[in-house]
Image: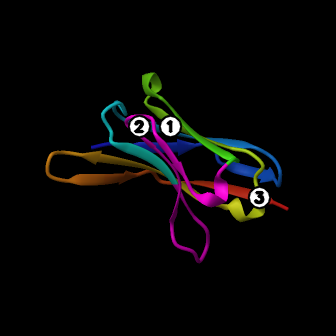
Amino acid sequence: QVQLVESGGGLVQAGGSLRVSCAASRSIFSINSMGWYRQAPGKQRELVALITSGAGTNYADSVKGRFTISRDIAKDTVYLQMNSLKPEDTAVYYCNAQSCSVTACRDYWGQGTQVTVSS
């Protein structure tokens, strides 16, 4: 089991920056991957950024060069630094952790944090 708690969302003007955090209830060292997803009103949830246990990263094309995912293993926390924000980045941002055993993988989700970018 992993509980995830997001924080750091808010309202920012276009062009501004925001950092959201995801604190896990246990060590993230052995978690296969952690990521940030977002869901805007009327749209499907989409992957924003992912970081693997080997520290590999993957980004949605729409955020490449603007967003950076990172982790602090000592604090069991994953971050998403968002720069050059656009109104279309407005969404609820969810933290995800995928933990795998020999036989299966399981996804865990946080409660979400609202990010609103005003034009």
- Mark in front: 1 vs 2: 1
Q: Magenta segment range?
A: 37-64
Find disc 2 in the rendering and name its residue: 24
Q: Is residue 30 magenta?
A: no
Name the spot of residue 107 as percent of width and height, x first: 33, 54
Q: CA distance from mark 1 to mark 2?
A: 8 Å
Q: Which mark is residue 86?
A: 3
Q: Is residue 41 magenta?
A: yes
81 versus 36 height, above or below: above
Residue at 74% from the left image edge and 45% from the top image edge: 83
48 versus 18 height, above or below: below
Residue at 14% from the left image edge and 51% from the top image edge: 103
Closer to us: 84 or 108: 84
Query: In the image, is 33 to the left or to the right of 13?
Result: left
Residue at 35% from the left image edge and 30% from the top image edge: 29
Name the spot of residue 78 as percent of width and height, x first: 50, 37
Q: Secondary structure at mark 1?
A: strand
Q: Residues within 10 Å of mark 1 (few under 14, many from 20)?
A: many
